[in-house]
Every structure is written in structure tokens, then in C-alpha cells.
Image (cartoon, rainbow, N blue to C red):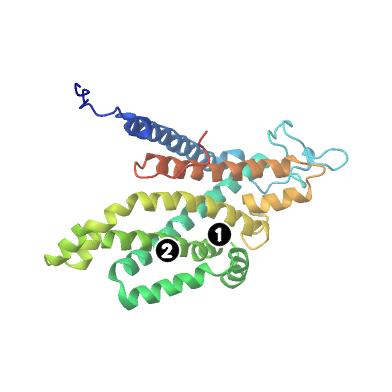
Amino acid sequence: MSALPISTQKPAPTGAHAPGRGGAAARSAAAKGSRLWLAGLVLLGVLCLLALLAPLAGSPYTIHTDSLTADGLPSGVGAPGHPLGTDAIGRDMLARSLHGLRATLLIALVANLTSVGLGAAVGLVAGFYRGWIEQCLMRLVDVFLSIPTVLSGLALASIVGRGTTGIIIVVTALYWAWTARLVHGETVRLRNRGYVEAALAHGVSRHTALRRHVLPHLSTVLLNVAALNGAAVVVVGAGLSYLGAGIQPPTPELGNMLADGSDSMTYAPHTLFVPLVLVIATVLTFVLIAEGLNRRNPLSERRSWLDA
């Protein structure tokens, strides 16, 4: 009986193991991430441009009594001289919205920078130097993470005062611990890598090893944290102003404009919808940037809410 021929050919890979498919999927995800990231940057640029052009829209404090109707109601969208109408007492909604957007963006950018910077510094030191330094710093982080955001925000606002500086301090105090926790975990992972341990074994100082071998690898994490943190900062900052713990009227800010608009929503809905659209657009800006950065990372396998 003749022996059956034995094939030496390996079976062709199928599915995710097929050659080129993994690379194609990674390139597709990176391309989609680039589009999302670019869309977020463009939207952020448009919002910043509108905020910079706010003085051209006029004063947000001027009361235009002639813009009120015979019944004393505010003008609606498209009124002559007031493209977005007026608020309940006759102030131009376009001017107030752009000045309010400027205040919201200023709070978001400055508070985001300070909270991410402080949190990154604490997380780096705690994760790299370990020992009693790590225990002390991370227990402090746990204390801040255990405090309810809204209640602690209202309490801090009553202590540091209301206004732009006060709300920046409050938001920074509320969000630095989240960044510290994330950076700490990533720093511990990098601290145990072979190249870091080899550098320390060859006499490189811990400060130099931290600066040269750990910090550069945290850039992607810090960018993602900053983008997502920016969205949260916008919501919390506007929420505190809405509750009366942030910037106070008559100074326009999107949060206190939402509070004013909710009072006049029944007879002037545009006073609520205009600042609401700007808040949503600002939050969406940071979300798109964060999602785009995440998709551009080839090591990320997290499924996104934007996936089809």
C-alpha cells in the first residue's frame, strides 16, 4: 500500500492572524484617530477665535431697552441688531455669549493646566521614589478622591471666594488627584522596566533616570488625561457657576448664563439654548481630541463609543 502524500505547507492564516490585516486595522484606527484629533483641534480653534473676537460684539453689560417688545419680553433670534436676540433685561445675547465663552475657556485651560501639572508631579514622585514618600502622597490622593465633587466644590468656593481665580483654585483642587492616580500607576510600570533598572544600576541618578527614561514615555498618557480632564473641567466649572458658586452676574460666564436662561426658558428659550450649545461644543472639543489621541496610540485596544 502506497503512503499518502504528506503536505508540508502550513495552513493559511485566517481572521485577525492573516498577514497585513492587523497592520491595516492599526492604520485604519490611526487614520480615524487623526481625523477625530484634527476635528477637535479645529473646533477648539474656532471657539478660541470666537472668544478672542468677543470685544467686537459689543459690551455684555449694556441694556437695550428698545429691544424689548411692547409686553416687556426679550427679542428673539434674528432680531434687528441682535442676531441671537437679547436676554430677559435686554442685554445682547451674542455679546454675552462670546464673553461668557471667553471666561469658560480661560477657566478650562488654566485649571486644566494646573491640575494636570500638579497631579503629574505628585504621581511621578510617588511612583518613582516609592517608600514612605509614595505612601504619604498616595494616601493624600485617596483622601481627595473620596470627597464628593459637587459638595467639596461648593465648600471650597465658600472658602477661597467666588470669581475666576476662586473657581480655578476649586477645580484644580478637585481634579489633580485623578491625574496623580493615573500617572502614579504608569510611572510604577515604567519604573520596573529593564532599561530603567539598568540605568540605575550603572550609577545614573534617580533624578536623571526619571527625566530621561520615564517622563518621555508619559507624554501620551498626559495628553489623554489633559484632554479628558478639560471636558470635565468645563462641566464642573460651568456647574459651579450655575449653582452660584462660581463667577457671579452680571459678569457673563456660560454657567451663570444657563442659570439665567433656565428662569426665562418659558418665554425666551434662546437664552438657555445659546449658552447650552456653547457648553456642549466646548466639551465635545476636548472629547474629540482625547478620542483621537487614544486611537492614534497603536497599543490601545479599548473599544470606543464612536465605533460603528
Q: Left or right: 20 with respect to 275?
A: left
Q: Which residue lies at the image location 46% right of the left edge and 65% below the top edge?
A: 177
Residue 122 in view here: yes
157 or 94: nearer the viewer: 157
Using a 10 Å C-alpha cutoff, classify the residue at mark 1 as few (fewer than 14 neighbours), some (14 to 19) or many (20 or more): some
Q: On the picture, is 179 further left or further right than 187?
A: right
- State the CA–CA distance, disc 1 to disc 2: 27 Å
Q: Residue at x 60, y 39 (%)?
A: 57
Is 275 above or below relative to 124?
A: above
The secondary element bearing badge 1 is classed as: helix
Mark 2 Cα-neighbour bin, 10 Å: few <14, some 14–19, many ≥20: many
Q: Please state which amino acid type lies under the numbered disc 2.
A: Arg
Front: mark 1 or 2: 2
x 33%, y 51%: residue: 219
Where disc 2 sits, the SS reads helix
Task: Judge from the rendering whether residue 113 lies leftward or rightward of residue 283; answer left or right.
Answer: left
Q: Amino acid at mark 1?
A: Thr
Mark closer to the chain start, 1 or 2: 1
- Vertical side of 273 occupied by 176: above or below: below
Q: Position of residue 307 (x, y in %)?
A: 50, 36
Q: Are marks 1 and 2 in contact (CB under 8 Å)?
A: no
What residue is disc 2 on? 181
Residue 12, quarter of the rendered image: top left
Q: Position of residue 292 (x, y in %)?
A: 43, 40
Q: Position of residue 79 (x, y in %)?
A: 74, 32
Q: In the image, residue 141 lies at what x, y percent?
A: 45, 70
Q: Which residue is mark 1?
A: 164
